[in-house]
Image (cartoon, helix red, strand yellow):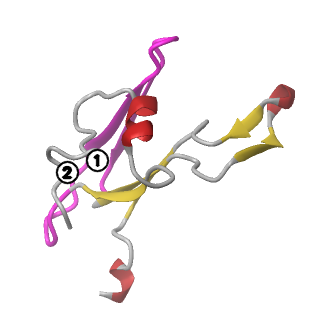
Amino acid sequence: VKHVEKTLFDLRKPVLLGSRLKELPGPGFDHNFCLCSPGELPVERKCARVVHPGTGRVLEVSTTQPGVQFYTSNFLDGTLKGKGGAAYSKHSAFCLETQNWPDAVNQ
């Protein structure tokens, strides 16, 4: 487990996600962020707040899980079509998946 402070993975304060994705090495985010320490009792905590500047829409996510997986649709290529024929391209969506830490079941 590594601390995110002073890295491109530090999303604790608002950032423009598109700009951050351009700086990030690799295809994008597909990482689990630890929300607590091992052995800590599960309590509900806010783990994400996303604001769409154009519309003012806000998404807030809370969880009792110890981690959140953040994925930025790194492998969509525009061939998948949605409502009204909208093309789903790379980084056109994201997922916030609250969960236990990866491989926790084997530990």
Q: Are marks 2 and 1 in contact (CB under 8 Å)?
A: yes
Q: Is residue 77 left or right of residue 46?
A: right
Q: Is residue 69 above or below residue 48?
A: below
The magenta segment is 36-64
- State the SS at label 2: loop
In the rendered structure, find residue 58 and report the number of the disc placed on it.
Answer: none
**In the depicted structure, whether residue 48 falls above or below residue 3:** above
Please rate how many residues cluster around mark 1, counting C-alpha atoms within 10 Å: few if below 14, some from 14 to 19, many from 20.
some
Q: Is residue 60 left or right of residue 36?
A: right
Residue at left 13%, top 65%?
Answer: 40
Q: Which residue is mark 1?
A: 9
Q: Residue furthest bottom?
A: 106
Residue 83 relative to residue 74: left or right: right
Give coordinates of residue 59: x percent, y percent: 44, 29
Q: In which quadrant will I find the C terminus?
A: bottom left
Q: In the image shown, does 75 or 34 lie closer to the viewer?
A: 75
| Near-viewer residue (89 or 51) | 89
Q: Which residue is mark 2?
A: 4
